[in-house]
Image (cartoon, helix red, strand yellow):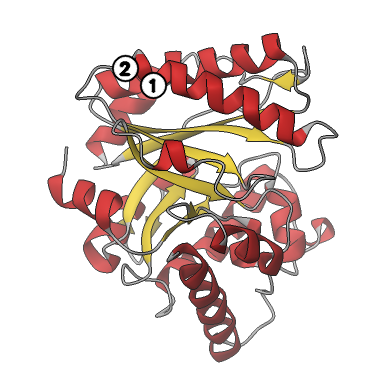
Amino acid sequence: MNTEMLDKVANGHGFIAALDQSGGSTPKALRLYGIPEDQYSGEAEMFDLIHAMRTRIMTSPAFNGDRILGAILFEQTMDRQVAGVDTPAYLWEQKRVVPFLKVDKGLAEERDGVQPMKPIPDLDDLLTRALAKNIFGTKMRSVVKLANKDGVQAIVDQQFEIGRQILARGLVPILEPEVDIHSPEKAEAEALLKAGILAGLDELGDDQKIMLKLTLPSEDGFYTELVEHPKVLRVVALSGGYTRDEANAILARNPGVIASFSRALTEGLTAQQTEEEFNATLDAAIASIFEASKT
């Protein structure tokens, strides 16, 4: 493992940029960026456009390791290039931003109030490729809709089971059991989830560290126990549908938790902006998220 990357993620000031929209979420991301679906045809063209958007973000002078610790990439982004260099190498060597890889294949159907991850049949091959590209860690998402004890436990068990496979390959997994911000039982679900995560951490080896990507909690400071846990490298928060201003305000009230925003990071960016407008908008977004992550 790259010790310089490890030190940056563990001790650095900043946040993690989530640039990992996949097939299901890409059309919405492009639409918000000012490119409606009638302006492209087919998946290949769609992915070319989203890569162009990500490239514009990553090559912007506003985007660098001074305020951004890491970036989560979609598999295709890992395999593509930015400025003639493999994307992970560009991020680390040119920007000092630590590269992570989204490894899940999306969500399965809801059962017991949760949506677990679909199977990841090619995980070992994907991790081999990630290691060859100097990827530091991974991310995988599942969703909790209701405070169903069996459902939440199933989510936690799945996250830790795959997390252990990733740890065994020398990568740092970000477990992302998201709680839906619109859940009528959000606070209760968060309580079940925290208890499950703490139990899962107890089963890890003393030398094993993971990261957690969690929904901004209903109760301020609710995840402090996880932030301070010796087996948790970092707790990051997703924006989860909140506006950037809302997400920043809640984040600032949760000491030790840093952002890992996707839509809230790119809010306000459009394909139609001049480079000057685009860079200024991105700089303001990064500045506000950085400030909220400093608490």
Q: Quadrant of the N terminus?
A: top left
Residue 50 x, y percent position in the rendering: 60, 57
Q: CA distance from mark 1 to mark 2?
A: 5 Å
Can I make out residue 110 in this image? yes
| Residue at the farthest top position | 150
Q: Which residue is mark 1?
A: 201
Q: Is residue 43 above or below residue 69?
A: above
Q: Residue furthest left?
A: 3
Q: Tally the numbered discs.
A: 2
Task: Give the residue displayed 67% in from the left and 43% down from the top.
Answer: 43
Q: Name the amino acid type tagged 1.
A: Leu
Left or right, 22 with respect to 4, comes to right
Q: Are marks 1 and 2 in contact (CB under 8 Å)?
A: yes
> Residue 287 location in percent, x, y?
49, 77
Disc sitting over residue 204 in the figure:
2
Q: Is residue 192 above or below residue 223?
A: above
Q: Amino acid at mark 2?
A: Leu
As drawn, is 68 to the left or to the right of 260? left
Q: Look at the picture and state if 219 lies above or below 158.
A: below
